[in-house]
Amino acid sequence: MVSEYLLKILSRSEKETKEIGKKLAQEVLKGKKPKVIALIGELGSGKTTFIKGFASGLKIKTKIISPSFLIFREYPFFYRKRKYKFYHWDLYRLNSKKEILNLGFKEIITDPKNIVAIEWADKIKGILPKNSLKIYFSFKNLKEREIKIKK
């Protein structure tokens, strides 16, 4: 039987989780992956840590802070002398899909110069682009997290 996941990774530390995020960002920049990344998993399972590594892979120098109370943060960056934007969304406190649409979500995810990572993306299943890369985070034990990547 063929696995439904493109990749399953066991991370044994925050450092490893950040490194996985960094490597994926480098693939996204090469155009080999979708520009909308949906992160799904329990509280504390490594989503924000992954995002910090992802931003590092985009060469973003600004400290990445979870946008739990703001819904999203925008980080400009340059790649091959072109300006892009990385959007980090955290939908933990989202009450309805309408909230995200009122924040310009559709416009942001359709702009080819944007890369978007969405924590708690399972809250907006119906409005995620079909080609989103889905990443599932789960606890294995106190130190280990399983990261499953699915297209």
Image (cartoon, rainbow, N blue to C red):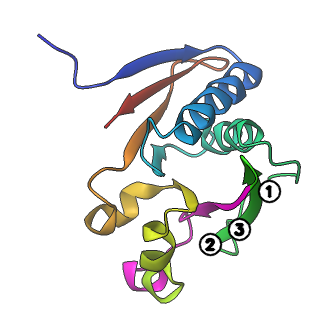
The Cα atoms of the two marked residues, 2 and 1, are separated by: 11 Å
**Residue at the image point whose x is 87% and y is 52% from the top:** 63
Instruction: Give the position of the N terminus as an image quadrant.
Output: top left
**Amino acid type, residue under disc 2 in the picture:** Ile
Nearest to viewer (mark 1 / mark 3): 3
92 horizontally vs 58: left or right: left
Nearer the N terminus, badge 2 or badge 1?
1
* Relative image position of residue 134 (x, y in whole percent): 39, 42
Query: Do the numbered discs 2 and 1 sit on residues whose CB atoms are within 8 Å?
Result: no
* Residue position marked by numbered label 2 in the rendering: 71
Occupied quadrant, residue 149: top left
**Amino acid type, residue under disc 1 in the picture:** Ile
Query: Do the numbered discs 1 and 3 sit on residues whose CB atoms are within 8 Å?
Result: yes
Occupied quadrant, residue 133: top left
The Cα atoms of the two marked residues, 3 and 2, are separated by: 7 Å
* Residue position marked by numbered label 1 in the rendering: 65
Callout 2: SS: loop
Please tell me the numbered disc located at residue 73.
Answer: 3
What stretch of residues is rendered in magenta? 82-100
Callout 1: SS: loop
**Amino acid type, residue under disc 3 in the picture:** Arg
Classify 10 Å Cα crowding around label 3: few (below 14), some (14-19), many (20 and above).
Answer: some
Count of marks overlaid on the render: 3
Please tell me the numbered disc located at residue 45.
Answer: none
The Cα atoms of the two marked residues, 1 and 3, are separated by: 8 Å
